[in-house]
Amino acid sequence: MSDNEHTYLLEVDRVSQSYGTEKVLRDISFEMDRGDVTVLVGPSGSGKSTMLRCVNRLTEIDSGNIYLDGERITGPDVDVNELRKEVGMVFQDFNLFAHLTARQNIMLGPRRVLGLDKEEAGKRADEHLEMVGLTPQADSYPGELSGGQQQRVGIARALAMEPKLMLFDEPTSALDPELIGEVLEVMRDLADRGMTMLVVTHEMSFAREVASEMLFLDGGKIVERGPPEQLFDRPEEDRTASFLRRIT
Ligand code: ADP
Ligand code: MG
């Protein structure tokens, strides 16, 4: 049911969501073109994680629509497993399998979900290990890797599914400060390669340099959206200015 009206890679159209009686997302709309890096910022509890989770259907919305590459991905008739092949997600706390090596962690999705054979999946894992600079650590277990290396494996694992869109939920928040840079560098490289990325982060220098657009969310509403220069240097809303002053 491709719909020619919906030509964006991602289109979030008047989405609202609540947990019980608590309204979390209120009438959120935004769009992303192919290759866009959209950075979502806002105070704790403003609904950032919930917004990402709605895009891969870990959380169900109450109203509105979400379209991925022209297809509606909300509604009861959507194959959620198919959707999750197309949307990669990177979490704050890596979520790697401790009993599998880096290479095996990356092979798992291509093997189990895409049905690739061992050789094909291994080849894909090696390509993505190289991309995140971890070829020498291919056979290491997560417990033998630093947090920054583990998160790079997490990114490689998501990329090995060859998704159309990557979601990042505070990918560097659990890391010691000296390990943040290597993860941001991989993300910057990915952006340069044209990956479409929706990123929740408090790393404002990354946002300023890499974002094509920023969304400032507060109380489940988009208070302001625009290029990083606008939000940082000439915000239109007082709330944007005071939030960004606090965290930069
Ligand atoms: P953020 O990522 O911006 O910190 P979240 O999307 O995690 O915000 O949370 C937004 C609001 O939704 C918060 O008030 C939070 O307590 C609530 N919330 C998040 N997840 C759940 C859940 N699984 N059940 C109930 N309430 C939740
Ligand atoms: Mg969150």
Image (cartoon, rainbow, N blue to C red):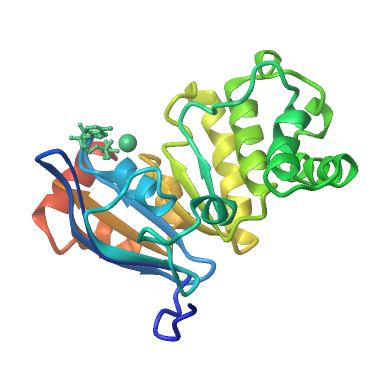
Q: Is residue 230 visible?
A: no
Task: Establish if 236 lies above or below 163.
Answer: below
Q: Quadrant of the image for the C terminus?
A: top left
- Residue 118 place in picture, x, y as percent: 86, 39
Task: Establish if 140 lies above or below 185.
Answer: above
Q: Residue at x 41, y 51 (%)?
A: 207
Residue that extends furthest to the front in the rendered view of this protein: 77
Q: How many marks?
A: 0
Viewer-side residue, 72 vs 239: 72
- Residue 2 place in picture, x, y as percent: 49, 79
Q: Is residue 191 visible?
A: yes
**In this picture, residue 1 sits left or right of residue 98:** left
- Quadrant hosting ligand 1: top left
Viewer-side residue, 239 vs 17: 17
Location of residue 212 (image quadrant): bottom left
- Residue 106 place in picture, x, y as percent: 71, 36
Location of residue 235 (image quadrant): bottom left
**In this picture, residue 88 sits left or right of residue 21:** right
- Residue 201 place in picture, x, y as percent: 39, 42
Residue that extends furthest to the right in the rendered view of this protein: 119
Q: Residue at x 58, y 22 (%)?
A: 147
Q: Residue at x 45, y 80 (%)?
A: 7
Viewer-side residue, 16 vs 2: 2
**In this picture, residue 79 sits left or right of residue 235:** right
Task: Establish if 216 lies above or below 43.
Answer: below
Residue that extends furthest to the bottom in the rendered view of this protein: 4
